[in-house]
Image (tube, helix red, strand yellow):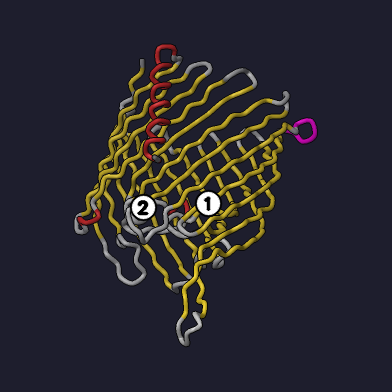
Amino acid sequence: MKLTTFLVLFLLLAVSCVMTSAFADERKVIPSIALQQEYNDNVYFSAHSRDADFISTVSPALELLNNTERLQAGLKMQLDSAYYHDNSNLDSTDQDYSGSLRYAVSSQANLFTSAGYRRDSRVDREFNQTGFLLGAVTRDRYNYRLGGDYALSEAMRAQLQYTFAGDYYESSAYSDFKSHDLSLMISRDLSEMISRTIGRVNLGMTKYDSQGSQVTNYSGTIGAERSLDERFSVFADLGLRFTRSAFDSTHLVPSGIPFVFFVVPYEEHAEGAGISGQAGMTYNGELNNAKLVLSHGVTAASGRNGTVERTAVQANIGRRLNETSRIGFSAGYTLNKSTQDELGAAATDESSLWLQPKILYALTDQVAVETSYNYAQLINRQADTDACRNLVLLRLIFQYPLFE
């Protein structure tokens, strides 16, 4: 059913993209292919033994864009075929399909939707985003989004959206999960009181379902974003969250016969509260750009039974050296914590750190070379383990946009 639903939504986006092509102000077809070579000194990200390997990846992709005065539509399809020199059992072909559509109903109202499907299997597939490691298990990930925004006045706007996400694993050792998120944001231009400032209120409810657990998180934040000048801006949203949890559990009940007990299932409930929000800054200059974001809140723990309270810091810095080359540096730190039977079926206490400098050089308008180094570390205080990994990457990218 989940695959059928995705295919229906994806085909609707594809049909919309194609049907608007005849009226498009801008239409692009962008085929591309990337050839990537990695050296990974800890393929399994193990804390006990280090298994190094060379990994070759071929990534063909196709992107379609159709934009009119009122509609923006896009589709992207990509395959990542990875080949390991020594660990051939890890060879795989990951798939990634996504589409989005935004339509201006009027000068005041917009509707938007998107759908995505990804099939992946790399151990470190989401480490930089979540701080979690997964084994070499195949996962199917689905996501859908539907929403709209409306101008309540010249200074005030409201946005309502619903998002579904689901992860499904080909191994009983991992917990499938799905989430339903409903959010409302109201923003207002505060320039009359504070120059170049927009204030906003966010209200949200997210329900996470995994095997044997259900977690519902309610959150509300109030914040603002201010442009200090044309290049530099700061933002902050701070509020509270309230969480209700239910977990399947068992206990022993005496049977009336000495030394004989019955295992009786029951549902355990818990509640919790805390702080939720984010803060950060962005800088976009002629040669330099930078972004720093600090966030904290309850989020899904893919593959695990329940959720976690996540604190994360992410930074990105870039500089354009000349017309053909750029350098960049990215870093992230994540702390995932949960107590047993409050946010997760098992306690979690893990911190992760990663650093990545990179260089991008454009050989021509269609061909570019990228090289980077990535250091990553994961500390699991529950298991008392400390794992690290070094990865060196060289990528050749070729794309040839087609315009009509």
Q: Residue 34: horizontal and vertical position, in percent? A: 29, 38
Q: Which residue is mark 1?
A: 208
Determine the CA span between mark 1 and mark 2.
16 Å
Q: Magenta segment: does it hold 138?
A: no
Q: Residue at x 35, y 63 (%)?
A: 45
x%, y% of residue 76? 37, 32
Q: What type is the residue that disc 2 sits on?
A: Tyr
Report the front residue among 360 and 149. 149
Dot 1 or dot 2: first in sequence order is: 2
Q: Main secondary structure of the magenta part?
A: loop
* Circle 2 residue: 169
Q: Which residues are magenta?
A: 191-195
Which corner quadrant holds the N terminus? Answer: top left
Q: Is 189 or 325 nearer to us in this picture?
A: 189
Nearer to me, 251 or 32: 251
User: Does dot 2 land on a helix, a strand or a loop?
Assistant: strand
Check the image and report above or below for 50 versus 229. below
Crowding at dot 1, Cα within 10 Å, few <14 / some 14-19 / many 20+, comes out as: many
